[in-house]
Structures are given as C-alpha cells and as structure tokens.
Image: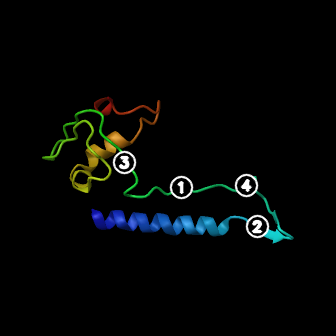
Amino acid sequence: SLLRMRGHIIINLIVAFILLGALPRTVVNGGEFTGEYSKLSGIIIPGFASTQLRAWSILDCPYSPLDFNPLDLVWLDTTKLLSALNCWLKCMLLDPYNQTDHPECKS
C-alpha cells in the first residue's frame, strides 16, 4: 500500500545517509584535497516526480479496471501503480536469466 511504499522510501534514504557517512573523509591541506578517491562511489536516488517511465504497448492487467496503454505515464500514475501492482512489477522486472522484458510487456 501507499504507507508501505513511503516506509520503503524512508528506509532507502536512511541507508543512503549511512552509506554517505561511511565514505572516506577528505581533508583540505593547504588548498589541496587528500583522500582515497579510487574507492569513492556515488549513490543516485531518483526523484518520484522526475522519473517518467512510459508504457510502450497495451497490457491487460487482470483484476484491475485500469490497463496500460501506449504512452501512458506508468510511474507517476499512483492509481494504476497501486491497483495493478503485480502487473506493474511484471513489466518492471527483467528476466533473471537473459535480462529481457516480459513477453507481454515488450513493445
């Protein structure tokens, strides 16, 4: 549900801050930065409103009155996302063996 999704977002933010806190510190020494930059990695957290995934084919979602039509916003439409969660997940997850889309979700 929406409350559980908010909980996951909060947990992800907490984990991100913990990981950022564990990164090696850099020290300014006479205007020069010193530190271990080869191990420095970045964390990208996409914004909810900035992600614009679109449907590329018609998908009939069972047990849901809402279907995905071509060029529908998929991620921003929380009504479709929450009412057809299994259908949405089926199209978001890649096949674990060959990393391709689900056959019903291909364009």
Between marks 3 and 4, how big is the CA–CA gap? 31 Å
Q: Amino acid under label 1? A: Ile
Mark 2 residue crowding within 10 angstroms, few (<14) / some (14–19) / many (20+): few
Q: Residue at x 53, y 66 (%)?
A: 15
Between marks 2 and 4, how big is the CA–CA gap? 12 Å
Residue named by callout 1: 44
Between marks 1 and 3, how big is the CA–CA gap? 16 Å
Image colouring: rainbow
Between marks 1 and 4, how big is the CA–CA gap? 16 Å
Please tell me which of labels 1 and 3 falls first in the chain.
Answer: 1
Q: Amino acid under label 4? A: Lys
- Residue 31: image location, x then y, percent: 83, 68
Task: State the SS at label 3.
Answer: loop
Numbered label attached to residue 1: none
Between marks 3 and 2, how big is the CA–CA gap? 36 Å
**Residue with the most extreme left position:** 65
Numbered label attached to residue 26: 2
Residue named by callout 3: 52
**Disc 2 or disc 4, which is closer to the eye?**
2
**Disc 1 or disc 4, which is closer to the eye?**
1
The answer to whether marks 3 and 4 mark residues whose Cβ atoms lie closer than 8 Å is no
Please tell me which of labels 2 and 4 falls first in the chain.
Answer: 2
Please tell me which of labels 3 and 2 falls first in the chain.
Answer: 2
Q: Residue at x 66, y 67 (%)?
A: 22
Placement of the C terminus among the 4 image quadrants: top left
Is 81 on the left-hand or right-hand side of 23?
left
The answer to whether marks 3 and 2 mark residues whose Cβ atoms lie closer than 8 Å is no
Task: State the SS at label 4.
Answer: loop
Please tell me which of labels 1 and 2 falls first in the chain.
Answer: 2
Residue named by callout 4: 39
